[in-house]
Amino acid sequence: MPGSTPTPAAPAATTGPATPAPAPIGPLAGFTVGVTAARRADELAALLRRRGAAVMHAPALRIVPLADDAELLTATKQLLDHAPDLVIATTAIGFRGWVEAADGWGLGDSLLARLRGARLLARGPKVRGAIRAAGLTEEWYPASESLAEVLDRLLEEGVDGSRIAVQLHGEPLPGFVESLRAAGAEVVGVPVYRWMPPEDIGPVDRLLDATVARALDALTFTSAPAAASLLDRAERRGMRDELVDALRHDVLPACVGPVTALPLEAHDIPTSQPERFRLGPLVQLLTHELPGRVRPLPVAGRRLEIRGHAVLVDGELRAVPPAGMALLRALARRPGWVVARADLLRSLPGAGRDEHAVETAMARLRTALGAPKLIQTVVKRGYRLALDPVADTKYADV
């Protein structure tokens, strides 16, 4: 149109390589999780690492091979000589191992014949699968996967005069077995596998030391014997009270289910457990619980999230050396307040009396964070986190 101003041409698009998007941060990035499992430990560790966690593994127990266990052979022969009326299978790996061990002894067909002639109860669906894989059929299993529900059902039915074989799952079940015997049953325990202390106790001791030092954010347990074994080892080293204190207040004890948690809860250690007693839900529990224990801080216009061994700065994971983490935690206990060099020195492990160690560690911390303005120097007084005076609305619900 006449008198109109020409529209300037749009700038030409650049043809250079696109900047790659930053890799997503896993929900457990920056956290360290201890694994005490002997069985399926690699699977659990892989699930944790896939979500960003650092993993410290120390099997608290080892399993005696079934075919080498004389107690299992003796119990199997007793059942072949005198058939049971009822068999209670408690774990899938144990039931499968029992059948495989009997095959190795040349007793497999005889054992299966005895089991076909008895009522079979399973503790849960995984055990039911093992029973059916052996060509057998279970009569019932509880939806709760709890032996307490199995016991209630049997006591309600009445077991007086019955011969009951109970597949033990790594440790005796005195409350369960004694209740059946008190009701008049003859109970034969079948020790399908036994837990023993690990041959190399070094990794367990290092795990204990890391827990007591709060170098772990969570400690996972997938069996009650492992929890009991760790407590026993701490007792032998004279550090059980320190371990209990760490698990009560700072290191999250995560158990795969309520049976696993019993040894810890006997010491008044509160535990976290998933609704479904499986490894996947256990890891999902940690991905929710651990980040939820961290309070993000609005500092110098940034969002600061202090995790176990690293820091998130506006969602970017920054590795921080141990001395720097000690200083940062000391500052974060009173965000925005000045913390004296002498107090910061006391927070440094093995720093001695030279306050120059604080200055050195602080310089490295600022470099690691990649944002020097997060921590302010207050001349002749100390250091402070540069906490924003009025939190932005995006932090209001944190």
Image (tube, rainbow, N blue to C red):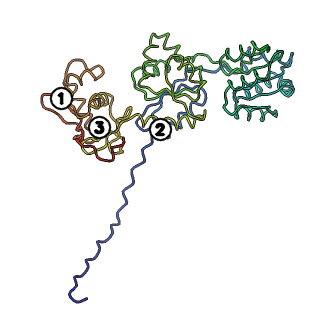
Q: Residue at x 29, y 32 (%)?
A: 332
Q: Residue at x 66, y 27 (%)?
A: 146
Per the model, the C-alpha gap separating discs 1 and 2 is 36 Å
Q: What is the secondary structure assignment of the residue under circle 2? A: helix
Per the model, the C-alpha gap separating discs 2 and 3 is 27 Å
Q: Residues within 10 Å of mark 3 (few under 14, many from 20)?
A: some
Where residue 117 appears, as percent x and y from the top left, is 87, 26
Residue 74 in view, yes or no: no
Compared to residue 175, the image places residue 319 above or below, namely below
The numbered disc on residue 7 is none
Between disc 3 and disc 1, the foreground one is 1
What residue sits right under mark 3 in the picture?
368
Q: Residues within 10 Å of mark 2 (few under 14, many from 20)?
A: few
Where residue 230 appears, as percent x and y from the top left, is 52, 18
Q: What is the secondary structure assignment of the residue under circle 3? A: helix
**Amino acid type at mark 3:** Ala
Q: Residue at x 37, y 61 (%)?
A: 17
What residue sits right under mark 1 in the picture?
382
Disc with the residue nearer the chain's start (1 vs 2): 2
Q: Residue furthest front?
A: 156
Between disc 2 and disc 3, the foreground one is 2
Q: Residue furthest bottom?
A: 2
